Amino acid sequence: MRKKRLSIAAAAALLLGLTACGDNGGSSDEIAIGAVHPLSGPLAGVGGMMNDGAELAVDDINAAGGIKSIHGAKLTLMDGDSEGSAAVGQTEARRLVSDGAVALIGTYQSDVTENVAAMAERSDVPLVIDVAIDDKILSHGYKYVFRIQPNASTMGASGAEVLSQIGKATGQDVTKVSYMHIEGAFGESTYQAFRKEAEKQGIQVVRNVSYPATNFSDATTAVTQALSGDPDVLVVSGYYPDNLLIAEAVKAINPNIKAVFGIASGAYDDTSFPSDGGAAANGVLSANYHYSATSKRAQDIRKRFQEKYGRPMETAAMLSYQAVEVIAAGLEKSGSNDPVALQNAIANIRIDDTLLEFKGPIEFDDKGENKNATVIVTQVQKGRIEQVFPEEFATSDLIFPARDH
Amino acid sequence: MSKTTNFSPEQTSAHPPLLKRRQTRIILATIAVAVLLVAGVYLLGGQPTRLVNQALISGVLLGGVYALVSLGLTLIFGVLHIVNFAQGAMLTLSMYTVFMLSTQAGLNPYLAAVLTIPIMFAFGWAFQAGIMNRVMGDTSHERPLLVTLGLSLLIINGLLMAFGGRPAAVESPLAGSISLFGTLVDRPRLIACLGALVVGALLTLVLRKTPLGLAIRAVAANDTGAALVGVNVKRIYAMTFGLGAVCVAVAGGLMAPFTSLIPTAGEQFTTLAFVIVVLGGLGSIPGALVGGLIVGLVQTVGSLYLPGGGSLLLVFVLFLLVLFLRPQGLFGAKQ
């Protein structure tokens, strides 16, 4: 009953949306990009921020003269609200495409992206994924789907690699770790990739504790369980609230470990983590894709984002900005607003001045993955998120062991 | 309207005991089963003793939090016979009220929680008196239910508009933990757990010892009868919803220090609170307390064996088992 009424309301809202956006497409000197993000529901905070990031990119490109190879055509952004649900996300994506979007960006969640990607492929409209980690999305041989961030197995594996490198660089060998991850495709695939690479690096996973994505309001027991294997480092993959709880539980238990090390953690490189976590946040390491704190251009964008929207621009929003830039560069290269030509252009694109700390330019392989996507390590130091490893991206010195017991 | 709640007519005699003999028996039986299960976990579970200790302590604390959330729901359920879908959203609303009072006005969060009580009472009273009493005819049970669903959507999206969806935090001056038998007892959670007991006791006292409580129990038992002897039923409905909102205010105030505040933060408790209320018996206050404790313990201790969502599975298996053996819930009155 509840579902049914909601879906009637959603259908009504959709109809309204259709009539409102009806006159958006069509015009030849305006090119529409569709953005699908969770604008309501539990993920509305990050979804709205990502939309703002995309909007800022569109404004910047228009202010710089639009798409020059198409007579300075201006970009417009059309919003779709996935409500955090795969079915709604797919419907919204279809609406945006039928309203004339030549390309899509999105969607923050792996399951939603999976559906939107299938829709994009069938409609021959390119989808540039800003955030979505699951390997499976690009395992179907899609031609029209591209991903800027590293996928789960890359992140798990490079997480193990950098952890081992950190141990060697500081002379503090890491041989035993416990792994805590959120239940579901994201946590599970990251963990599996980590374990495989860790074994190669001589790191043993002594405990693996998964916790539920909902109704997880106290982490003490789960953390105690993970620590019972007496690990050197506690590795964590998950979202914001749960990872904050884990850091707080570690602080309370005060175990003899060298560090809490997040991989693809939704909290440990977030700018609100140091103040929310307080002492619990101090020293926490995070291996994740990250906006480029060493790039002048990225700094300028973050500054203007803060001025315009009154809140800090997290990495997810920077990825949305970057996704719009990839599409704009594709349009510039193809010289037309035909989605099929755009697909071809994006598949062969090369963007040197990236806004994220990657090991090279953005280039897509034949699966659509960014060849040079990589993780870097950040650490909470004196209430700030600092880039600490590898050295070429460092804004501050790494502190390891990160906890004084 | 079903009259299966605990506020039954025979309890309206002058000074009933706070717990009846039947309830005492159920409590003893529940404790016996729990002790047996816990002993089983210690002796045959194959887990380190310290870990089981920690799981038990965390389970009791979590159970206290659940009980706190369920108290208001069981009251509204018991008297108004409405499933209040807005319970979780009202919990979030109280947390944000505490957040505003403590960050904007610089108040101690526990003082802010006390100030939230009259605010939420007024909110609950006004909602029932202004809207719910109009739609609570005897023809449709769906209308009030849908109105509470609407209220929950309104609160969640209103909070989203006002505060955005980025997580916010309330800092507790009492943050930290106490060491007990080699385990950790988180202080804010302990306070919330004790809060549940205090609220449960106060609620029982109000219901059993005051004229208002007498009227509430009369309305719960038979609203037509109560109206005939001169009870203003609509006023009692409003007072009850107000009291239910007060329970949520206390819950929100005590939980804010250890919750990441987002507009949907309270939603995850709604489903479990329903389970607890039905498990304990509709409208029963000891039922909500014991039910909360059971669900908290099963979830936490169960997570040692079934990681991830498996512990919730155990909760629902137990729920089905109780419904099968005792359909009216542990402390529910017989139909």
Image: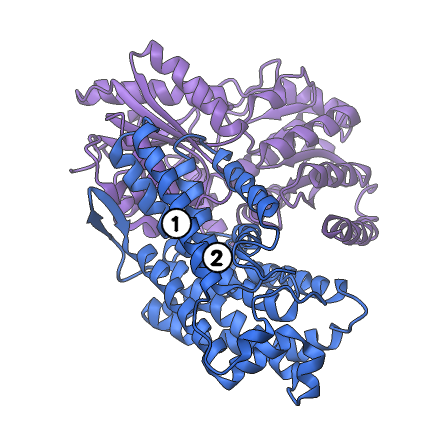
Chain colours: A purple, B blue
View extreme (top): residue: A200
Q: Chain of mark 1?
A: B
Q: Judge by depth and name the residue closer to the eye, A10 or A39.
A: A10
Q: Residue at x 70, y 77 (%)?
A: B133
- Secondary structure at badge 1 equals helix
Q: Dot 1, how many residues are within 10 Å of its Cα: few (below 14), some (14-19), or many (20+)?
A: some
Q: Which residue is mark 2?
A: A310
Identity of the amino acid at label 1?
Ile
The answer to whether residue B170 shows anywhere in this view is no
Tell me the quadrant of the picture where the C terminus of chain A can be found. Answer: top left
Q: Which residue is mark 1?
A: B31
What is the quadrant of residue A381 in the picture? top left
The answer to whether residue A293 shows anywhere in this view is yes
Identity of the amino acid at label 2?
Gly
Q: Residue at x 53, y 83 (%)?
A: B212
Q: Is residue A49 left or right of residue A393?
A: right
- Residues under labels 2 and 1: Cα distance? 54 Å
Q: Is residue A172 left or right of residue A79?
A: left
How many badges with numbers are in the image? 2
Select label 2 or label 1 by which is in front.
1
View extreme (bottom): residue: B230
Residue A228 is situated, as x and y percent measured from the top left of the image, at 27, 29
- Secondary structure at badge 2 equals loop
Q: Is residue B274 above or below residue A361?
A: below
Q: Is residue B177 above or below residue A226?
A: below
Residue B10 is situated, as x and y percent measured from the top left of the image, at 57, 74
